[in-house]
Image (spheres, helix red, strand yellow):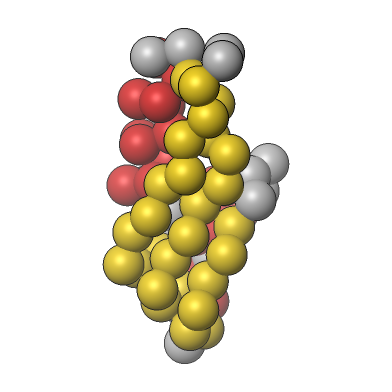
Amino acid sequence: RSMKVLLVDDLLATGGTMEAACRLVAAQNAAVAGIAFLIELDALNGREKLKDLDIFTLIHY
Protein backbone atom coordinates (compact mmCIF):
# COMPACT_ATOMS: atom_id res chain seq x y z
CA ARG A 1 0.00 0.00 0.00
CA SER A 2 2.22 2.75 -1.23
CA MET A 3 -0.49 5.33 -1.97
CA LYS A 4 -2.13 7.23 0.89
CA VAL A 5 -5.49 8.93 0.46
CA LEU A 6 -7.23 11.67 2.44
CA LEU A 7 -11.01 11.31 2.21
CA VAL A 8 -13.18 14.43 2.59
CA ASP A 9 -16.97 14.57 2.93
CA ASP A 10 -19.46 17.20 3.99
CA LEU A 11 -21.36 15.17 6.60
CA LEU A 12 -20.72 12.27 8.97
CA ALA A 13 -24.04 10.78 10.06
CA THR A 14 -24.13 6.97 10.39
CA GLY A 15 -20.72 6.41 8.81
CA GLY A 16 -21.96 4.06 6.11
CA THR A 17 -20.90 6.14 3.13
CA MET A 18 -17.39 6.73 4.43
CA GLU A 19 -17.05 3.09 5.48
CA ALA A 20 -17.83 2.10 1.86
CA ALA A 21 -15.37 4.71 0.54
CA CYS A 22 -12.65 3.26 2.78
CA ARG A 23 -13.35 -0.22 1.40
CA LEU A 24 -13.00 1.13 -2.15
CA VAL A 25 -9.65 2.70 -1.27
CA ALA A 26 -8.45 -0.59 0.25
CA ALA A 27 -9.62 -2.49 -2.86
CA GLN A 28 -7.25 -0.31 -4.90
CA ASN A 29 -4.33 -1.27 -2.63
CA ALA A 30 -4.16 2.20 -1.10
CA ALA A 31 -4.37 3.32 2.53
CA VAL A 32 -6.62 5.92 4.11
CA ALA A 33 -4.32 8.50 5.71
CA GLY A 34 -7.22 10.34 7.32
CA ILE A 35 -10.80 11.46 7.00
CA ALA A 36 -12.20 15.00 7.20
CA PHE A 37 -15.80 16.14 7.57
CA LEU A 38 -17.38 19.57 7.64
CA ILE A 39 -20.21 18.48 9.98
CA GLU A 40 -20.59 15.50 12.31
CA LEU A 41 -23.96 14.51 13.77
CA ASP A 42 -22.70 13.20 17.10
CA ALA A 43 -26.00 11.56 18.17
CA LEU A 44 -25.82 9.09 15.25
CA ASN A 45 -22.44 7.65 16.35
CA GLY A 46 -21.03 7.37 12.83
CA ARG A 47 -17.51 7.69 14.22
CA GLU A 48 -17.88 4.20 15.73
CA LYS A 49 -17.77 2.60 12.26
CA LEU A 50 -14.54 4.46 11.53
CA LYS A 51 -12.85 4.09 14.92
CA ASP A 52 -9.52 2.81 13.57
CA LEU A 53 -9.02 5.91 11.40
CA ASP A 54 -7.82 9.46 12.03
CA ILE A 55 -10.94 11.67 11.83
CA PHE A 56 -11.15 15.47 11.77
CA THR A 57 -14.45 17.37 11.98
CA LEU A 58 -14.99 21.14 11.88
CA ILE A 59 -18.52 21.33 13.33
CA HIS A 60 -20.13 18.94 15.83
CA TYR A 61 -23.91 19.00 15.99
Total marks placed? 0
For the N terminus, the quadrant is top right
Q: Quadrant of residue 52?
A: top right
Percent across and percent down for residue 17 are: 32, 47
User: What residue is at 56 percent from the left and 15 percent from the top?
Assistant: 2
- Residue nearer the viewer, 22 or 7: 7
Q: Say if 20 sits above or below 1 in the image.
A: below
Please tell me which residue lies in front, 2 or 16.
2
Q: Looking at the picture, does residue 29 appear above or below residue 52? A: above
The answer to whether residue 13 is visible is: no
Q: Quadrant of residue 19?
A: top left
Up the image or down, 54 lies above or below 30; here it is: below
The residue positioned 46% from the left and 74% from the top of the image is 40
Query: Could you tell me which residue is drawn at 41 percent across and 76 percent down?
Result: 39
Relative horizontal placement of residue 31, taking residue 8 as reference (left or right): right
**Where does residue 42 sit, x and y in percent of width and height?**
53, 76
Residue 35 in view of the camera: yes
- Residue 29 sits above or below residue 38 on the image: above
Q: Position of residue 44 (x, y in %)?
A: 47, 70
Q: Residue at x 50, y 79 (%)?
A: 58
Residue 3 located left or right of residue 53: left
